[in-house]
Image (tube, grey):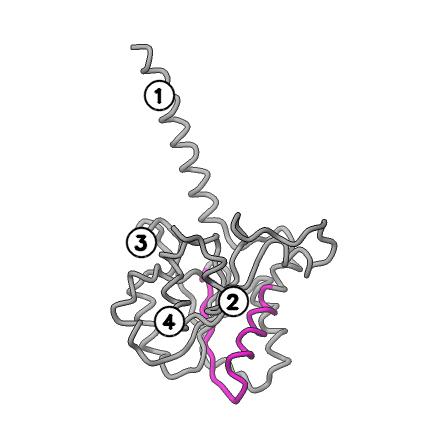
Amino acid sequence: PMRRPLIVILAVLGICISLVALWWQLRPLPEGNPAVVNLMGLTLAEETAKIVPGQSRIVVVADARQAQDGKPTGDIAAGFSTGLKKYPHLQVVATELVTFDIHVEDGVPAIVSTTFQELWERHKDVAVIVFFVDLPAWYRVETWLAKAEGPRFVGVAGLPQARWRYGGYLATGRQAALIVPRQGTSPPPPGHPKTPQEHFDRDFQIVTPQNYDAILDAD
């Protein structure tokens, strides 16, 4: 009988933690510092240009909640658009707006794997697909994507994600660059950030096929 109050308290605490985690996952990309989010968009443009130095066609995939008149809005989209002006060889030939259902796959607000595959089939002849949103977990698409010919990916992750989610994309080279929030295994640079670039370097990092082993959580 004495253990029942403790069990109830632990159960309530567990529910509260789950609700906080759910809120954290559902929130849009960080808006507290628009200059930093804008810099994320600029960085996506730079990373895209690195992997396609010649004339190339690209597709942008964005959150439908952050769009107006069929076009992405917000600081990350503005930063990407500004960044592309430096690279006239990159041509955006299509923009896809997607919605999420966290109850469908893994409890993470990412593109549902079936929607992702349909999107891939429509645009498998472009050089790069740039994602302003999370991809499906690798294990949900690896059976067909691992051997498929087609574009590489550049994108952002809303949360620090474990190896099971992104490791396959990076190990196969399909994901050329991924901006992720920093986590415990990769401490930020020392000192208090003063500029948007310093804030970006403190809070985010760029994961590539060359460095993902040292960065992604080895769950």
Reading the image, the residue beneath label 1 is 8
The answer for how far apart the CA atoms under marks 4 and 3 are is 22 Å
The residue at 63%/64% (across/down) is 39
Tell me the tag on residue 106: none
Q: Residue furthest left?
A: 143
Label 3 sits on a secondary structure element that is: loop
**Which mark is first along the chain, 1 or 3?**
1
Reading the image, the residue beneath label 4 is 172
Q: How many labels were placed on the picture?
A: 4
Reading the image, the residue beneath label 3 is 105
**Which mark is first along the chain, 3 or 4?**
3
Identify the magenta region. Answer: 40-64
* Location of residue 27 with respect to 84 vertically, above or below: above
The residue at 52%/50% (across/down) is 183
Does 111 sit left or right of 202 as displayed?
Answer: left
Of badges 2 and 4, nearer the viewer stands 4
Q: Is residue 46 magenta?
A: yes
Frontmost residue, 100 versus 206: 206
The answer for how far apart the CA atoms under marks 3 and 1 are is 29 Å
The answer for how far apart the CA atoms under marks 2 and 1 are is 45 Å
Which amino acid does the dot numbered 3 rest on? Glu
The answer for how far apart the CA atoms under marks 3 and 2 are is 24 Å
Q: Residue furthest top?
A: 1
The residue at 34%/62% (across/down) is 138
Q: Is residue 174 magenta?
A: no
Which amino acid does the dot numbered 4 rest on? Thr
| Rendered image quadrant of residue 198 | bottom right
The answer for how far apart the CA atoms under marks 2 and 4 are is 29 Å
Label 4 sits on a secondary structure element that is: loop
Q: Residue furthest bottom?
A: 55
Reading the image, the residue beneath label 2 is 72
Of badges 2 and 1, nearer the viewer stands 1
